[in-house]
Image: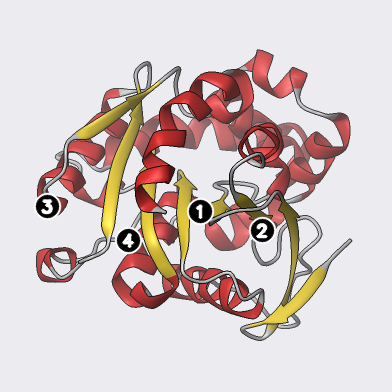
Amino acid sequence: MPSIGVNGTDIYYELRGTGPSVLFISGATGDAGHFDRVADLLADEFTVVTYDRRGNSRSPRPSGWEATSVPEQADDAAALLTALALAPAAVFGNSYGAITALDLLIRHPGVVRGALLHEITLFSVLENPGEAEAVVAPVVEAGMAAGGPQTAAEHFIRFAAGDDNWDRLDPDLRHRMASNGETLFGIEMGTFESYRPDDARLAGITTLAQVLVGQESPDYFHEAAAWLAARLGVEVVQTPGAHTPQWDRPEELVRTIRPLLRALS
């Protein structure tokens, strides 16, 4: 299993295919396996990079690491692309991963050819920013009460992606994702949701970016996507399904994003 030391931590990564490079950044539970099927489908045309974000799955938790930040996550992604000699790359970020990809555009434009920002958790920009938290908090609390961080992680993913999606995932992937509950709830949750770049920094982005949102996603994802798209001067692109089409509609998702990735190549 390939791993590389970057930005003061060890990052597990996987490479598939040949052609222009594309980096996929996962959201909550941070596992490269989130994109296995999508990566396989795109490997006929692109060099696809997936990775476990720091402190998740096969990327070990650094000694003394008790907090993270969006810049730290973006620095990890930039250092990984640089170390693998795959920069500049197109980037696809889902959920928390879209936040990281946005920060890459702002702070590391030299490693990014362009970005697809899917289901971005920019809840800080919502008219009622507590709306999403009010829905999520009881789910996490019930999971914690039932079995601690691992059970809470399962409850959270079942809520975000649906029971059928969770049940269909590879058992090893499910185990790794649940085991990341301590990182998700102890370090990550709240950090990504509070991220809010100012309009001047967004206006300074010169790299092409697209904002994507699931057709069936809750209104707060559509509101966040519309806010960001307006500031980037782009139209929101609709993707099939809801928050995680990479799991239940990978072929449809690839049909949507393949021409967008080609445009970034």
Q: How many marks?
A: 4
Q: x, y percentage for residue 135?
A: 41, 29
Image vertical order of residue 152 relative to residue 3, above or below: above
> Who comes first in sequence, dot 1 or dot 4?
1
**Residue where numbered disc 3 is placed:** 231
The quarter holding residue 63 reads bottom right
**Residue where numbered disc 1 is placed:** 189
Q: How far apart are marks 2 and 3 (CA)?
A: 32 Å
* Label 4 secondary element: loop
> Who comes first in sequence, dot 1 or dot 3?
1
Foreground of the two, 4 or 29: 4
* Label 1 secondary element: loop
Q: In this view, does 263 lie to the left or right of 39?
A: left
- Looking at the image, can residue 142 be seen? no
Q: Residue placed at 18% from the left, 44% from the top?
A: 229
Mark in the foreground, 2 or 3: 3
> Who comes first in sequence, dot 2 or dot 3?
2
Foreground of the two, 136 or 228: 228
Foreground of the two, 80 or 169: 80
Mark in the foreground, 1 or 4: 4
Q: Distance between the residues labelled 1 and 4?
A: 11 Å
Q: x, y percentage for residue 204?
A: 15, 70
> Who comes first in sequence, dot 2 or dot 1?
2
**Residue where numbered disc 4 is placed:** 195
Q: How far apart are marks 2 and 1 (CA)?
A: 9 Å
* Label 3 secondary element: helix
> Who comes first in sequence, dot 2 or dot 4?
2
**Residue where numbered disc 2 is placed:** 183
Q: What residue type is labelled 1?
A: Met
